[in-house]
Amino acid sequence: MGVLEGKVVLLSGTGRGIGRVAARRFAAEGAIVAGGDIDAAAAAETLRLIQADGSVPGTAGPLDVTDEDSVRAWVEGCVARFGRVDVLYNNAGAVRFADIAGQPFADWRFTLAAELDWCSWSPGRPGRSSPPPAG
């Protein structure tokens, strides 16, 4: 029995890199991973790898963390299927790098939106409907 047995993990950016590794590790510890990625096929491959590892399958789907409707649909889909979210792992993001003097403000806003905004769109934020409390 893993330390996260039966916990529902909402994990963004599961299509590659750290997100894929984290999804597989959470699953190996018994968690049910509800993953999402802008590359839905890559997220589905991570789910396939989780199943091949012998872990409990979760879900994988399309997710654009810069789009509020995409985030809301992803979170609500997880809550509808599993009844709750126990762990939120904010892995996905996108950045546009430049030196401070040369970076257009639009690129700064894009980076902040991709890295931070989606967390405020999730249930649990004041004024939003919250999923039922865990266990």
Image (cartoon, rainbow, N blue to C red):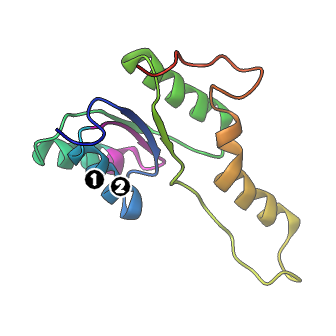
Report crowding for label 1: few under 14, some 14 to 19, many 20 or more residues within 10 A (C-alpha).
some
Q: Classify 13 as above or below 84.
A: below
Q: Classify 60 as above or below 20.
A: above
Q: Which residues are magenta?
A: 31-43
Percent coordinates x, y for residue 97 in the rendering: 69, 76
Which quadrant is the C terminus positioned in? top left
Depth check, front residue: 94 or 87:
87
Percent coordinates x, y for residue 110 in the rendering: 74, 57
C-alpha distance separating marks 2 and 1: 5 Å
Amino acid type assigned to the residue bearing label 1 in the image: Arg
Amino acid type assigned to the residue bearing label 2 in the image: Ala
Q: Which residue is label 2 attached to? A: 22
Percent coordinates x, y for residue 61 in the rendering: 40, 36
Marks 2 and 1 in Cβ contact (< 8 Å): yes
Q: Is residue 77 left or right of residue 104?
A: left
Circle number at residue 25: 1
Q: Is residue 120 left or right of residue 78?
A: right
Residue depicted at x 65% and y 42%: 118
36 in magenta: yes
Circle number at residue 37: none
Residue depicted at x 71% and y 29%: 125
Q: How many marks?
A: 2
Residue depicted at x 38% and y 18%: 81
- Which quadrant would residue 20 be assigned to in this image? bottom left
